[in-house]
Amino acid sequence: MLEDRTTAASSPIAWPAAYPQGYAVVDVETTGLARDDRIISAAVYRLDARGEVEDHWYTMVNPERDPGPVWIHGLTSEMLEGAPLFTDIAEEFATRLEGRVLVAHNAVFDWQMIAREYARAQREAPVRQRLCTIALSKELGLPLPNHKLESLAAHFGVVQQRAHHALDDARVLAEAFRPSLVAAAARDVRLPLLECRPLTEWTDRPVPRQSGGYGSYRPTSWRPARKRPACPHPNPGRYEDGRPLKQGMRVAFSGDTSVERDLLEDRAVEAGLHVATSISRLTSLLVTNDPDSGTSKVVKARQFGTPVVDEAAFGQLLRDVAPADE
């Protein structure tokens, strides 16, 4: 177990003034990967500005539904039955996150699950920025065979004891994050921080589950994909600034939005637009609140010269979409 106040690298480092003053290393285990899935356990290691551990916290959470892939996380219905609901732990969880950068491995997933749980609880998670350790390892150019947590841990000699247990995964990540942070500071590397936007509008669409309880789950049955009908309108080309959107335009989304992504996509489809899952030369518009994030969609949009607008501007454009040229 990682001891509190572990000593960081002994050599003095001119710590970049722009670096955050504290971090919350987070791991959540869930009933699945879909937007209606729930958190069933959560762990937080609070770190100071230089990555040293201040304290840690762990809880199981009753998801009020079947636990999903038990063969992965090991938490059965019986184990979760007496656990607190998310509303019961929301305040304590928030105190662990407040004023800190959320750090996670594949941070967009952990943040989206947390944001949805707080939205359900009619609260807002006190998180303004996140840092993905996958992105940081890329910034540092670490020679990893892949981007799994176990590979990052092995690189820094961290021993994992219970994979897919939230507390141990958070411990492992905290141990691997500290030397990553020290290496970044020593080289004055810009940390790949992204804005976290709490959900202000969302909806649950329950996904049909197989009968027979969690034992009937299979890896392909708990990650459903949404399929949309083909757009009936031809693609009129790219969006031009100052002009309205036109039915048939191909619109892609990237990054966090305050309105849940599926709702935005539904509104785009209802307006007669084509929702694209990737960027190509045929994409009419990219909607993102993080134009400097460096995600693959943002990078491709730059390469192809695809116009980019933020969520607020897109909402205004949706109010007056021009009919297609049939």
Image (cartoon, grey):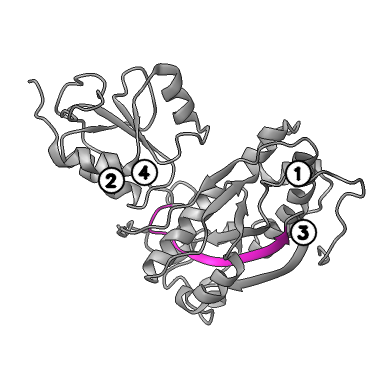
Outermost residue, bottom direction? Answer: 82
Question: Which residue is the site of mark 3?
Answer: 161
**Gap in angstroms between the C-alphas marked 2 and 3:** 41 Å
Instruction: First in sequence, mark 3 or 4: give its number.
Output: 3
> How far from the left and from the top, in percent, is residue 139?
67, 33
Question: Which residue is the site of mark 1?
Answer: 180
Q: Which residues are magenta?
A: 34-48
Q: Amino acid at mark 4?
A: Ala
Indicate left or right for 114 with 269 as reference. Answer: right
Graded by Cα atoms within 10 Å as few (under 14), some (14 to 19) or many (20 or more), the crowding at tag 3 reads: few
Q: Is residue 116 above or below residue 287?
A: below
**Gap in angstroms between the C-alphas marked 4 and 1:** 35 Å
State which mark lies toward you, 4 or 1. 1
Q: Looking at the image, which is closer to me, 241 or 162?
A: 241
Instruction: First in sequence, mark 2 or 3: give its number.
Output: 3
Q: Amino acid at mark 1?
A: Ser
Kindly identify which numbered label has been placed on residue 264: 2
SS assignment at label 1: helix
State which mark lies toward you, 1 or 3. 1
